[in-house]
Amino acid sequence: MSEDWTELYRPKSLKEVVGNPKAVKELKDWAIAWENGTPPKRVAVLIGPPGVGKTSTALALASEFGWGVVEMNASDQRNGEAIRRIALRGALSDTFTDSGDYLSHREGRKKLIILDEADNLFGREDKGAIPAIVELIAKTMHPVVLIVNDFYGLSRKSSAIKDRTLQIKFTKIAVPTVRTLLRKIAADRSISAPEGVLEIIAKNSNGDLRAAIRDLQALGLGNPELREEQALALDNRLTSKSMYDLMAEIFQGTSPRNAQRMAWDIQETPEFIMLWVEENLPLAYRDTEDLWRGFHLLARADIMLGRVARRQYFALWGYATDLSTYGVCAAKSKPYRGFVRYQFPSYLLKMGRTKAARGAKLSVSQKVGSYCHTSSRYAMMDLLPYISVLFRSDQEFRLAAMELLGLDEEDAAFLMGEKIDSSAVKHLIQALERKRSGESEEHDLRTTRLDEIEEKAAPEDKAPDESIKQKSLFEY
Ligand SMILES: Nc1ncnc2c1ncn2[C@@H]1O[C@H](COP(=O)(O)OP(=O)(O)O)[C@@H](O)[C@H]1O
Ligand SMILES: [Mg+2]
């Protein structure tokens, strides 16, 4: 239900990659050279900031040239040993067809070996990584792409990497280009989005398409008409650029004082800052003691917030912010370098995404509550689970509940666990309409029948037929 739009709209071919035409062409020329033999530079290094299409371009290249892909990304264990095992063997060895026939690498399909987010690869876990890469540079029989944010950090460690690779630079995507892509995606999702909103998102993305698409999704999910005030209401998300800077200052800076000052300047609530620090702390600190101290300080900050709420004593807010900025910055035992992809708090994203569902849950609970003369809280906790099960399994119950509780499409979609525009919901609404129009006819029938019954039954004075009585909701 909540697919990731950045993945959904990942460019599938080189043509779909927006921006950086020169880089794309250089990479393509290099691939053509590989098709015709072994080029002088066997390894291409894609250099550039996050979210500009480095990974996508490499993947699109492979699919355009019909190459297989051997991918090693940051989450893999990547040390000299692992690179040798996977990349170098993949790089050197001949290939087999799917049916197991031997093919020398000349006839066989080429494989593109991608070492993604390679910044952290060097120096940290294993000194053996650099020699393994140098070996790849000299020996690989398959094209290798190395992807980094900062080439300097890498090249200063090895002259072979500096001199014997093809370096291709990717730059930030210009605001109008970002906006154009956003407009296409919005149209594809049937979201009406005024230029003003797209402009705000595009500007705020700072040339990072991943960030831009993510913001569009956060705003647009379950919200087919974007309005400028909504973009402004989500100002928090839109100030994320400065929050990324603050994260870098806290986790990678060495001056707690600077981190504290930056937090003051940003003027976000302590809750918001704490959520960011909590999300990113485990990504940034790798030493367990540092992590322990960091989380300990966040816990203290949380206690301060609790006291603010209980005592309405807002002076404590300052402590909460200081503990999670100055404190967490000072908590590390050593400086951390290298690239960290800081994240927007997943908690807030999830809340944003489930907002529609939570709204419907509350709405149904209130309707059930008022029908049953209970609180909506009781309805939500104790009745809703049963109602939802019955609602999913029985059409008659569904129709009765729609009528008696006054549920709308959104409520029904929530109870069935379907999207509001799903065929299940549509069918239900149609059935309900049929029932309503049928009922007025049925009503006439019923009265005539009642008359007949009364006529016939009059002498014997029979009790009225049970089946005519309207059933209550809970008799179904
Ligand atoms: N140049 C681009 N053209 C189209 N979409 C892009 C581009 N760059 C990034 N994106 C979007 O952002 C997502 C992440 O891009 P990615 O290639 O992983 O960036 P990088 O590797 O530079 O960090 C993609 O899945 C796509 O949705
Ligand atoms: Mg990438």
Image (cartoon, rainbow, N blue to C red):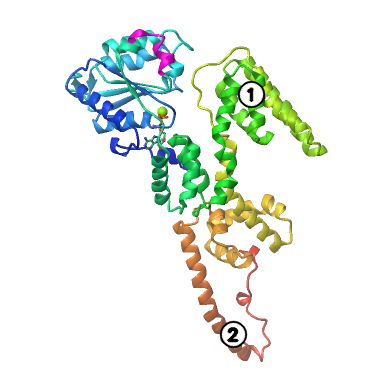
Of 299 and 424, which appears nearest the observer?
299
Residue 465 appears in the figure: yes
Dividing the picture into quadrants, the one containing residue 302 is top right
Of 401 and 375, which appears nearest the observer?
375
Q: Which residues are magenta?
A: 151-160
Q: Which residue is mark 1?
A: 259
Of 108 and 100, which appears nearest the observer?
108
Query: What residue is drawn where x is 56% and y is 81%?
Result: 443
Query: How far from the left and from the top, in percent, is residue 390?
Result: 58, 57
Residue 217 appears in the figure: no
Q: Which mark is residue 435?
A: none
Q: Nearer the viewer, mark 2 or mark 1?
A: 1
Q: Which residue is mark 2?
A: 447
Q: Is 448 one of the magenta-colored residues? A: no
Q: Magenta part mainly helix, strand or loop?
A: helix
Query: How far from the left and from the top, in percent, is residue 195?
Result: 45, 50
Query: What residue is drawn where x is 50% and y is 38%?
Result: 204
